[in-house]
Amino acid sequence: MRKRSMNVIVISLTGLFLFSLIGCSITEEKVSSDITFEQTIDGKLNSITNPKDYTVALSSNPYDYIKGVDSNKDYKYIVLQGEKSLNYMLTKFANRDKNGLEEYIMAIACSEILKENPASKKWATGREWYDNHISASK
C-alpha cells in the first residue's frame, strides 16, 4: 500500500513538473519572438553596412550597400516586414543620436515602407530624414 501511494506521488509530481515546463516554454517563446525580430533586423542592418564585398565597403554611396545580392535580400526582408520594421527603426532613431551609414539605410527603408516619393527627397542623412519625419507627423 505504501509503495503504491509513493508511486502515485512520484507520478503526480512528474506530471506537475512537465506541465510547468510546458507553461514556461510557451511564455518564453512569446518573449523571445519579439527579441528575435529585433535581433533579426539588427543582424540584417549589420550585414548591409558591413558587406563582404570590399569594393562596396569602399563606396561612399549608401545605395551601393543595398544593391548587392545578399544585402539586397536583407534590405528587401526589412522592407517587407512593413510597419513592424518601421516602428522598430523609428524607435532606434528615437533612442540614439547616431548619424552614420546604418541610419541612412534605415531612412531609405523607412521611406520605402512609407511609400514616400523618392523624387521629393529632402534629406541628406538618416538623422535628417528622421527629424523631418517627426516634425511632419506632429
Image (cartoon, rainbow, N blue to C red):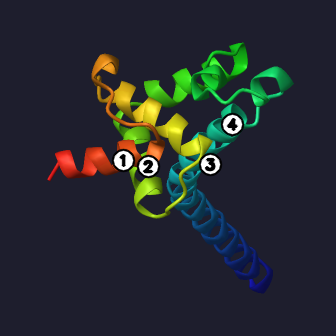
Residue 87 in sight? no
Q: Which mark is residue 53?
A: none
CA separation in Å, label 2 and label 3: 21 Å
User: Could you tell me residue 37's position as x and y percent?
Assistant: 54, 44
User: Could you tell me residue 31's position as x and y percent?
Assistant: 52, 58
Quarter that holds the N terminus: bottom right
- The answer to whether 138 appears left or right of 45 in the picture is left
Which quadrant of the view contains residue 113? Answer: top left
CA separation in Å, label 3 and label 4: 15 Å
Q: Secondary structure at mark 2?
A: helix
In this picture, is 42 found above or below 56? below
Mark 1 packing: few (<14 Cα in 10 Å), some, or many (20+)? many
The residue at which mark 2 appears reads as 127
Mark 3 packing: few (<14 Cα in 10 Å), some, or many (20+)? few
User: Could you tell me residue 61's position as x and y percent?
Assistant: 62, 26
The residue at which mark 1 appears reads as 130
Amino acid type at image mark 2: Arg
- The answer to whether 72 appears left or right of 104 in the picture is right
* 2 or 3: tag closer to the N-terminus: 3
Total numbered labels? 4
CA separation in Å, label 4 and label 2: 16 Å
